[in-house]
Amino acid sequence: MNGLRRLRIVCQLGCLLGFFWLFVATEYRGLDELPYPVSLLFRIDPLAALADFFAPGAFAWRLLWPALLVIVATGLLGRFFCGWICPLGTTLDGAGRLLKSPGGRPRPGLRKIKYLLLLGLSAAALFGVQVFGWFDPLSLFLRTLTFSLYPVYNLFANRVFDFFYDHQLPLISDLVNGAYPFWRDHLMAFQQPVFALGLFTALVFLAVLLLEKFERRFWCRNLCPLGALLGLCSRHALVRREPASLCSDCSRCQSACRMAATGSDGHARSECVLCFECTEYCPAERVRFGFHSREGSGQVDLRRREVVTALAVGALVGPTASIAPAAASADSYLLRPPGAVAEDEFLRRCIRCGECLKVCIGRALQPAWLDAGPLGLWTPRLVARFGYCEYNCTLCGQVCPTGALRPLTLEQKHKTVIGLAVLDKDRCLPYARNEECLVCEEHCPTGRKAIVFEQKQVLVRSRIKMLKIPRVVGKLCIGCGICETRCPVEGRSAIRVTNENESRRKRDGLAWKADEKRPSA
Amino acid sequence: MNRRAFIRRSLQVAALTAVGGLPCLDLQALPAVAADPPLALRKGTDIPRLVRETVAALGGMRRFVKPGETVVVKPNIGWDRTVEMAANTHPEVVREVVLLCLEAGAGRVRVFDRTCNDPRRCYRQSGIEDILREIPDKRLRVEHMDRRAYHELAIAGGVKLNRWSFYRPALEADRFINLPIAKHHSISGLTLGMKNVMGVIGGNRGVLHRGIDQALVDINQVVHTDLTIIDATRILVANGPQGGRLEDVEVRNTLIASPDIVAADAMGTTLFGLQPADLPSVVAGARRGLGVMDLDRVRMV
């Protein structure tokens, strides 16, 4: 194994481990501000930058400047990101080994799909529909970790720990039980994560892995829109391969290259991920990479008709998807995390990466299926019956890599209205059954409580009884949802948070303004 | 043994046999309520001194903690609130009580609470985790609740509850020291010692709020408190139990301590200008023999 190739493998594994570590660090561990840039993976993601670029409002320079560096570096060096850094690429390399990807001649016709996909997605984004995140390999990787693999790992680890806890085996149990607090505090989620789309997300990921059965790096070669973007950027890259075409006496490169970058039409710079494997398997040791050669092609083999079709389809997706009524108005229980920008802009900025869902301390956020509109798949929604928004926590805004969730100071957070709690008087115990219960009032976190009670005389079995009856004070409620989470009524809560009154909604002059309506909490 | 005693004993044996198949706490084994329980009330601004004086008035911590025993110190860490908001027990009170236990020779001191907000945030924000981490003693453990250690028990003689899940380490400890903070609470009126014990039970605690007074007595009959120290260095007089506004906090520089949890709570009501009879859980506790609520029958020390 030569030096460059070894360096590449070390870099791949190092990045993978690094991203795993940042992933595990995406959790509250005693500090209000996360000490690490846990969403680094997306801040270096050019596709996230592209999505953000098309969104209304200013480009999030503060967050996404590293992605532009990656683009510049790609322009100079080539598609090194795919071969050296991308965690999905590394995973697929590993999967390819396990699944024994076949060699043989590639199907170059498939390769253009990724460019057409990129063009279509871009046209759609320009016309108001941004779903880069569905296909972004980094989003795919991280949300699979968040929604599926990490919950499974936690469940499994907990089962193991529980076994040794419940069955006192001499020596082993003491050891395992002794390790449990450390493991729980540093290597596991504090509470078992549970996500609605865990299985679906895992199946998508599994499908991408299984494509390795057909070709090595099938996803990266043929489907990945990020690869396409980086490929386009690297057309004039300075690092070039020599020889740039197949040698007449040997065509090993044609079948052995993981990206099928070298074929009868030469070495395609926009496909080469600089893995440097060819420098090794070349029997004559002819292959060199360097800045010297002027040969080679950077061309991307696309027909004009295909390009026009992809752009047109993309542009039409926007208006077509907008035929349906807006999900937020159809579903008054559709809540977004605090700090979310207005729904339209939110959908166009969110790249469905799952970072906010990972970090949410109260397990309040769930990935949406089709319940947030057809384009809302995998976007975060706050489901207050599962968990609530912790009053003094600002983590989701800190991890969002695209500004779909704005970072909030604690003071801003206390005034940010996610929604409005509404009592269901047919279920609420004091109203419906004359029973005493004020759990919602007890947990309401605002300084002046947004849930108050009034004493009323009620007649219970012909005896007069004083009963405390809860009432929501609309001007004080921030919609954190703890009342809905804690409501002791079984099944659907007797108090539910609607998206009425949320801060991010554009309002007419008559309505409350979120900033004015609460003095100091 | 006269006839009446014979019948009573027979019934007790029969009842115990009947529930023998269940994992059941023998409520008959509760120590009899002392006729005139001692109670100490002290004031002072120097919290460590205040704690020491109050406990010394009751005869010192060695009266409650014997060498080698496992002690659970159970403060209120329920809310994600800072010290001055008076939603959690004052960290200095907790530290001093822990130090007293360690000095008395406790084999192990465990501090925990089942919080209402996120446990990690509550432990930190209350200041309790940080202040206890500074004590360099291996016998002390500040720990989060272990979800596996809850244990469902039948409550023989329970009025409101006949089964509930309890936190085993709290039951298994040799001594249970209860460190509530005195607060306003809109459901139970006030939250004092008996209410604080809700921090070592499992289950959906929300449903207990229907008929909470008898439920509190049921729970307190299972979890026996050896010493209650009510932290009234500052109290929350409105918007309890979690507060959040300094306007609702009153500084009182007071501690109340007694081995009798009902007596301690009864005295606690006077902090808020109430009588013991105004707090239904105190009345229910006294009626069911958990302790003494009549402050004239309490021996002030």
Image (cartoon, rainbow, N blue to C red):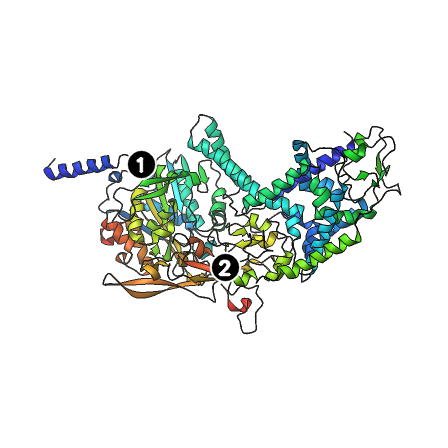
Q: How many marks?
A: 2
Q: Quadrant of residue B166?
A: top left
> Percent from the top left, x then y, of residue A427?
37, 58
Alpha-carbon distance for marks 2 and 1?
A: 44 Å
Closest to the observer: A348 or A417? A348
Q: Quadrant of residue B245?
A: bottom left
Give, as a three-letter code, the residue at label 2.
Tyr
Closest to the observer: B120 or A318? A318
In what element is the residue under mark 2?
loop
The reply to the same-chain question for discs 2 and 1 is no
**Residue extending farthest top:** A170
In-image side of A103 versus A465 (left or right): right
Q: Is residue A145 visible?
A: no
User: Which residue is label 1 attached to?
Assistant: B23
The image shows residue B208, relative to residue A325, as above or below, that is above
Q: Residue at x 65, y 33 (%)?
A: A99
In-image side of A404 versus B79 (left or right): right
> Percent from the top left, x then y, of residue B232?
38, 54
User: Which residue is label 2 attached to?
Assistant: A333
Q: Residue at x 84, y 41 (%)?
A: A265
The image shows residue A64, relative to residue A1, as above or below, that is below
Give, as a three-letter code, the residue at label 1.
Pro
Closest to the observer: A106 or A231? A106
**Residue extending farthest front:** A305
In what element is the residue under mark 1?
loop
Q: Residues within 10 Å of mark 1 (few under 14, many from 20)?
A: few
Q: Residue at x 18, y 38 (%)?
A: B11
Q: Is residue B195 visible?
A: yes
> Percent from the top left, x then y, of residue B242?
43, 56
